Amino acid sequence: MKVLQIITSLETGGAENLVAEISPLISKRGIDVNVLSFVSGATPFYKKLIDNDIKVYSLTDKSKFYNLRFILKLIPYLKQYDVVHTHNTACQLFVAIAKKISNARCKLVTTEHSTENRRRKLWWFKPIDKWMYKQYDSIISISDIATDFLIKHIGNKFPIRTIPNGVNIAKFHNAKRISEKRADDIIISMVAGFRIGKDQDTLIKSLKYLPVNYKVWLIGDGVRRKEIETLIEDLNLEDRVKLWGIRSDIPELLKTSDVIVMSSRYEGLSLSSIEGMAVDKPFIASDVKGLHEITIGAGILFPYQDDKRLAEEIKKLIEDKEYYLQVAKKCYERAMLFDISKTVEGYCDIYKHIMS
């Protein structure tokens, strides 16, 4: 069986991370897997795929995802594979159109990676979404709440199955600390793209209420980088916030940290959250859709954009060692429920089912 994973890019992000992680593991199960990225780039995720003997194709070296010419460029790829699996909106729509106009015989699978997106707020886009999803033989949703929101949007007459995103738990749990941290520093880390909805701003602002040895590490990059740099300068926090950019050593950076935070406005099933829990460190998240479900009963929740409350929760963890260890233990136990082997098994089952 030949499977092609299609994604907009291999930059930072949960969907990108998932494609880079699962493709080699699916390949080890005897399925021929390749990846097509709309936009090329020698990113850590790209290098990971290449290092694991996964072929990676691209349509352009420019950063525009919504190029209608991609529809025609996709057709030859669709005709070479048994299953084409899309991630992200542009891929979902363009592949659906490409198959319709080409009569390619491949089966289509897509993964919904978030609980909401901008197009669902546009009333005129709903008929387009319904048409698009009808072209798919299977729709994977990454959490129960994401499934509920998708059904609310398009109805329940679609082949939707919930398969939670997964993480290579052992890789994060067994990671080694790096030497970057000073002994008296308290490191608070967040892994997320610099884009609307991720809200690194709240974590940065929380430093106003914390001692000077509390530092923030932001791992990721994106369109809001300049805004974030300006905020750091305005608050005179240049010495306390480090922007790491896109990294391939995320397990080591998280293992070196003291607390992991995700202050997003919303998430689907955040892989970064699970990764943060997997390194035996306390995890704190904003109490919003997608993060509430994965965090409650294990990590700590704080009101969205409440930087002062976030600071209080961080300080409480650091000042109470017994509480710190208790939360860290619960977080690791929660992460174990999302080992990537379960995700891979679910994906392979779907591929075999739609081909039978």
Image (cartoon, rainbow, N blue to C red):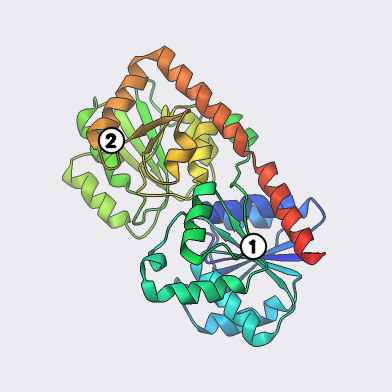
Tell which of 182 and 163 is nearer to you: 163
Asked whether the viewer can see residue 81, the reply is yes
Q: Position of 175 compared to 102: left or right?
A: left
Instruction: Pinpoint residue 262: horizontal percent, then vertical percent.
Output: 39, 40
Q: Residue 124 at what x, y percent from top left? A: 39, 76
Farthest residue, direction bottom: 101
| Mark 1 Cα-neighbour bin, 10 Å: few <14, some 14–19, many ≥20 | few
What residue is disc 2 on? 240
> Residue 35: image x %, image y %?
65, 64
Q: Residue at x 56, y 34 (%)?
A: 335
Instruction: Report the front residue among 10 and 242.
Output: 10
Q: Would residue 240 appear left or right of 256 to someone viewing this image?
A: left
Residue found farthest to the front: 156
The correct choice, above or below, for 92 with respect to 99 in the image is above
Q: At label 2, which amino acid type do we have?
A: Arg
Secondary structure of the residue carrying numbered label 1: loop
